[in-house]
Image (tube, grey):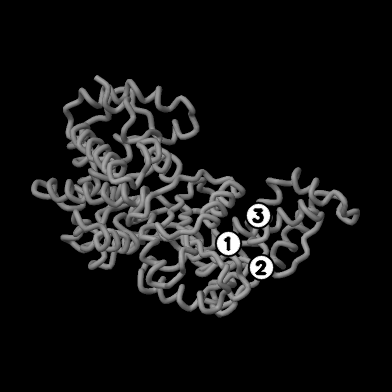
Amino acid sequence: MLDEALKQVAVIGAAGKMGSGISLVLLQEIAHAEAAASGRISGEPRLWLIDSNEEALLGLRAYLSAQLRRYAEKNIVALRSAFAEDEALTDNAEIIDAFVEGALKCARMHGDLHKVNRAQLVFEAIVEDVAVKTETYKQVRSQCGPETYFLTNTSSIPLGELDARAGLEGRIIGFHFYNPAPVQRLVEVICSAATVGPLRELAIELGKRLGKTLVMSKDVAGFIGNGHFMRELQHAAEQVADLGASMPDYQAVYLLNRVTQDWLVRPMGIFQLADYVGLDVCQNILRVMDTFIGDEELRCPLVDAFLDAGVRGGQFADGSQKDGVFAYERGRPAGVYSLSEGRYAAFGDAWLAEADAALGPLPEGHMAWRALARDRAAVEKLRPYFRALRAAETQGAQLARTYLRRSREIAQQLVDAGVAASPDDVTTVLTSGFYHLYGPANDLLWEG
């Protein structure tokens, strides 16, 4: 079933941040599978890459070419086997060239949405807006056959809403890649009550074929990943507001960001993560969650204030970080934006030392995330550190404990609501998608 569906695939929003990565992983799979099955790549059009920004499509071709070459170099042993019957290909360089050239011929790039009419699978990675997605699906539905399946990369919009509004009759499923899609192993799979069984089976088979870690989420706005992240962001903003009574706003933001990175042993702090995602994206996700989840208020005035001041974050086309809550130099935070002063407060100024002194020293036994990221014994190595964290009375330790308690509450809320089937699913999303070293319910955080 999947092999047949992969004969004609389209990606809408193919040149965007997520779409380009999704396009790459699909093209790699299509080309490699064809080479393995037939000993060659026919070059017939199989992957239709659609984006309204035709200039960005030129950049997409260059990106695909470079990344396909890296993929071929990394997988040369398998490709040598796939091309073994082709006597014209005698060395690795020729095999790599044949794979890259053949794969690129399989892809067709267009700015015209009507080019999806051949597709049996349509992947969508456009703006996180219910109305825009709905209108796009209505147009695509009119072009495609009744057997076409739709896989949306939405990170927050309920699938049932898109299905009902666009009249897709259960032929849509959430297939939420994490950024960047070629690197991140996690995919959240979301079925609505109407999603047809064959599509669910196809999506699971595709995820396994792509080597992804799949977690099933209930069709509730925000799902597991953003359901946790957005509520944590809200909590951090509330702590900033509390601290702002006794210190400048930028100093409070810095404190919370450092606590959530260093004290919690995470790859980046909460506001740096918001920069990475894009503050406008965070705001859109919160609006969606607030609209479709009726029993709690899901808004973040701090994010709204940054956006009102023109502070957006996000990434450039080459993946480098734009200035947001933080100003960046060579990809590292170098200053934090002051809402009250309308400028960035540089890390080289005297306030930084004052802020670090207010937090106090890290508890004994602390190890940085980078030192533990590839260590399978990371959790056990963190155990004595968390014992020290629970006993410490510094401001940094107190903020960290409050934050960890809220993180655990959010995880339990997701389980109680059935969004996640178990605490283990929340842990898998946070460790695989956000690169946390531990889950919020891990006993090393709470043991006596």
Q: Which residue is mark 1?
A: 23
Relative side of 180 to 128, left or right: right
Q: Quadrant of the C terminus?
A: top left
Left or right of 317: which side holds 422? left
Foreground of the two, 278 or 222: 222
Residue 22 versus residue 411 in the image, above or below:
below
Report the residue at 40% width, 49% height from top: 217
Query: Residue at 19% across / 47% down in the picture?
Result: 252
Q: Where residue 413 sits in the image (x, y, percent)?
A: 26, 43
How far, Cα to Cα, is label 3 from label 1? 10 Å
Label 3 sits on residue: 29
Mark positioned earlier in the residue sequence (3 or 1)? 1
Which residue type does callout 3 highlight? Answer: Glu
Q: CA distance from mark 2 to mark 1?
A: 9 Å
Q: Amino acid at mark 2?
A: Ala
Q: Position of residue 311 (x, y in %)?
A: 29, 64
